[in-house]
Amino acid sequence: MIDNAPLLALGAALFAAMVIAYGLGFTLHDWLRRGGEDSSTTDESYVLSGVFGLLALLMAFAFSLAIGRYETRRELVVAEANAIGTMTSRLALLDEQQRGALTLPLAAYARARAATGRIDNESQWETSARRDTTLCSGFGDLLFATLRSMPPDTRGPVLVQAYNEMCDLATSRHAARKARLPEGVLVLLALYCCAGAAMLGYTLGGTGKRHLIASAMFFALLACAFTTVLDLDRPRGGAIIVPQEELEAVARALG
């Protein structure tokens, strides 16, 4: 559910939930004070510091995991572009006719990989990724047929190694794009934000001052941080996307 929801809607919903939780916490403290409970906020302040300290730690962990996955996906794009470039350069080991027959399908594969990387819809991306696999297999069939028609020499292992690396990186990119932060972790983080907001309202209830502007700004910052984590965790679904320039440059170079 979280993976498919608009980022702005999720951020706004979390902000609204924190505001409501804050109001409930403030009201609860006021109700308990009227019922004769101790209104001292000294101990509550210590608890509040611990709550937000733990929230900061959880947010930092989530942010670190999300940006780590983003960096992995970005590095794999560069690695795949390099693998296709290596495959192109090693085709120079073949004669002109053999090289020409293999360059065209390799160029088509490079263009397809760059186009697949730009797709944001998951079902369309899966369909395009399957087409890429077919193109890679077709190129492999042509490559192996060419190698079988040649006398055995050192060029065969070099070309096969480059082909295998190219296909392996496509598989790695597919797995990296499907890897996301567990939804349960994101839900728990959002609930903890709301719990912290409720605790803040409960603590400020002892002072009788709501500090609405400062509290609203704090909740907005928390909502922005949470939305940024979600954006980093989505390869193509937000404002922070994995660039495909390296693959596109290789595809242009191949024609």
Image: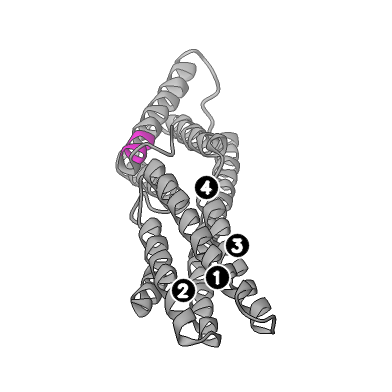
In the rendered structure, find residue 143 and report the number of the disc placed on it.
1
Quote the CA–CA distance across marks 4 and 2. 31 Å
The residue carrying mark 2 is 102
Q: Indicate which disc, 2 or 1, sits on the residue closer to the N terminus.
A: 2
Quote the CA–CA distance across marks 2 and 3. 19 Å
In the image, 170 versus 92, the foreground residue is: 92
Dot 4: within a 10 Å radius of its alpha carbon, few (fewer than 14), some, or many (20 or more) residues?
A: few
Q: Which of the two marks, 4 or 2, is nearer to us in this view?
A: 2
- Vertical placement of residue 40 versus 106, above or below: above
Which region of the structure is painted magenta?
A: 9-14
Circles 2 and 1, Cβ within 8 Å, touching? The answer is: yes
Quote the CA–CA distance across marks 4 and 3. 16 Å
Q: Indicate which disc, 1 or 4, sits on the residue closer to the N terminus.
A: 1
Quote the CA–CA distance across marks 1 and 4. 30 Å
Q: Is residue 243 visible?
A: no
- Vertical placement of residue 171 versus 84, above or below: above
Dot 2: within a 10 Å radius of its alpha carbon, few (fewer than 14), some, or many (20 or more) residues?
A: some
Q: Quadrant of residue 207?
A: top left
In the rendered structure, find residue 168 and report the number of the disc placed on it.
3
Dot 1: within a 10 Å radius of its alpha carbon, few (fewer than 14), some, or many (20 or more) residues?
A: many
Q: Amino acid at mark 4?
A: Lys
Q: Position of residue 247 (x, y in %)?
A: 41, 70
10 within the magenta span: yes
Q: Position of residue 62 (x, y in %)?
A: 55, 49
Dot 3: within a 10 Å radius of its alpha carbon, few (fewer than 14), some, or many (20 or more) residues?
A: some
Q: Indicate which disc, 4 or 3, sits on the residue closer to the N terminus.
A: 3
